[in-house]
Image: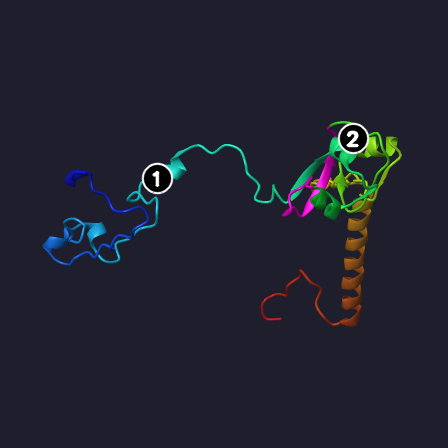
Amino acid sequence: MELNTLKPAPGSKRARKRVCRGIGSGTGKTGGRGHKGQRARSGGFHKVGFEGGQMPLQRRLPKRGFNSPTREDTAEVRLSDLERLKAEKIDLAALKEAGVVPAFSNAAKVIVSGKLARKVALAGIAVSKGARAAIEAAGGSTDAPIPQPKPKPEPKWVAAPQPEAQAKPGKDEAKAKADKSEARAKGEAKKAEARPHAKPEGKKGKKGE
């Protein structure tokens, strides 16, 4: 044993570092923060990953793929797993008890993997299209609803306004003008009859009359 090889006993606790407790502690004066600058000030903390305003590393790197936060909620069950189970009526609780799916799973779905030769009845378990065909071919059944195709949305369009065709002057328009002028002449004749002593319009008397 030598002085330069001495180490604390395994499991022993070391005293907590107390900064700014004199130069003898090794962290006196600046307390391990260095000389001035943003990190030396109180309240000069920035969020983790902040790089002084430039684009941080986590935003400079390319992003690929997508990890769903609920990817582990639904567990996959193979046809071969159903073949190994002894129970004929299988639900989520039976799958958890047999250890086929994790205990924290909220749902399960049967996929086409392996072979199924015995009759099983699934309750509350989703199935894929191929798995449904394999289960029914073996004489089994499932209460999972058959997915229906979604109706195609009707296109939303508005008919463009068409320019109105300009009506060409024809016989009807000419007739309307003639009727209008005739009605005006009749109105002037009635006014003249009501005023027999009035001078006719358009004629002026001589000066002094």
Q: In which quarter of the image is residue 53?
A: top left
Label count reads: 2
Specify the quadrant that holds the N terminus: top left
Left or right side of 138 for 15: left
Read off the magenta span.
99-113
Question: Element type at marker 2?
Answer: helix
Give the residue drawn at x 33%, y 49%: 11
User: Nearer the observer, disc 1 or disc 2?
Assistant: 2
The residue that mark 2 highlights is: 130
Please state which amino acid type lies under the numbered disc 2: Gly
Q: Position of residue 44 (x, y in %)?
A: 25, 54
Q: Residue furthest front?
A: 1
The residue shown at (75%, 27%) is 114
32 with respect to 13 (left or right): left
- Return the residue nearer the eye: 20 or 1: 1
Look at mark 1 in the image and give the residue it sits on. Answer: 55
The colour scheme is rainbow
Q: Quadrant of the C terminus?
A: bottom right
Answer with left or right where residue 9 lies relative to residue 33.
right
Q: Where is residue 182 in the image (x, y as percent from the top left)?
A: 80, 55
